[in-house]
Amino acid sequence: MSEHKQNNANTYKVIEIVGSSPTGTDDAIRNAIADAGKTIKHIDWFEVIETRGHVENGNIGHFQVTLKLGFRLEH
């Protein structure tokens, strides 16, 4: 591999997190990424792998979304 390609190569770590919101799945995703971004640098992508919710008295109490987050490791 050339030196140029080696300098442009990245290594990523993937973790799973769960976000929640009483208002919807979009907010659950945004909340999870915002909270993760407080302690994790270089978040580059996410993937929703599960959506579920909690029912209270016949109504949606809150939404939960499980995400995979990918972030670049520092060189």
Image: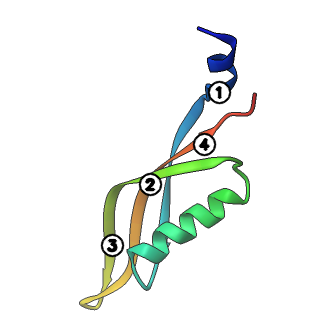
Residue at coordinates 69% horizontally, 49% vertically from top-left? 40
> Of discs 2 and 3, which sits in the foreground?
2
Residue 8 marker:
1
**How many other residues sit within 10 Å of disc 3, few (<14), some (14-19) or many (≥20)?**
some
**How many other residues sit within 10 Å of disc 4, few (<14), some (14-19) or many (≥20)?**
some
Q: CA–CA distance between discs 1 and 2? A: 27 Å
Residue at coordinates 60% horizontally, 28% vertically from top-left? 11
Q: Earlier in the sequence, mark 4 or mark 1?
A: 1
* Residue linked to disc 3: 53
> Of discs 1 and 2, which sits in the foreground?
1
Q: CA–CA distance between discs 4 and 1? A: 15 Å
**How many other residues sit within 10 Å of disc 1, few (<14), some (14-19) or many (≥20)?**
few
Query: Where is residue 64 shown, x and y percent of the image?
Result: 40, 68
* Residue linked to disc 4: 71
Q: Earlier in the sequence, mark 1 or mark 2?
A: 1
**How many other residues sit within 10 Å of disc 2, few (<14), some (14-19) or many (≥20)?**
many
> Of discs 3 and 1, which sits in the foreground?
1
Determine whether, in the image, residue 39 is placed left or right of residue 64. Answer: right
Q: Secondary structure at mark 2?
A: strand
Q: CA–CA distance between discs 2 and 3? A: 14 Å
Query: Where is residue 9 shown, x and y percent of the image?
Result: 61, 25
Q: Secondary structure at mark 1?
A: helix
Judging depth in this view, the residue of 45 and 51 nearest the camera is: 45
Q: CA–CA distance between discs 3 and 4? A: 27 Å
Residue at coordinates 75% horizontally, 27% vertically from top-left? 75
* Residue linked to disc 2: 67
Q: Earlier in the sequence, mark 3 or mark 1?
A: 1
Circle 3/circle 1 CB separation < 8 Å: no
- Which amino acid type corresponds to the residue marked 2 in the rendered image? Leu
Q: CA–CA distance between discs 3 and 1? A: 41 Å
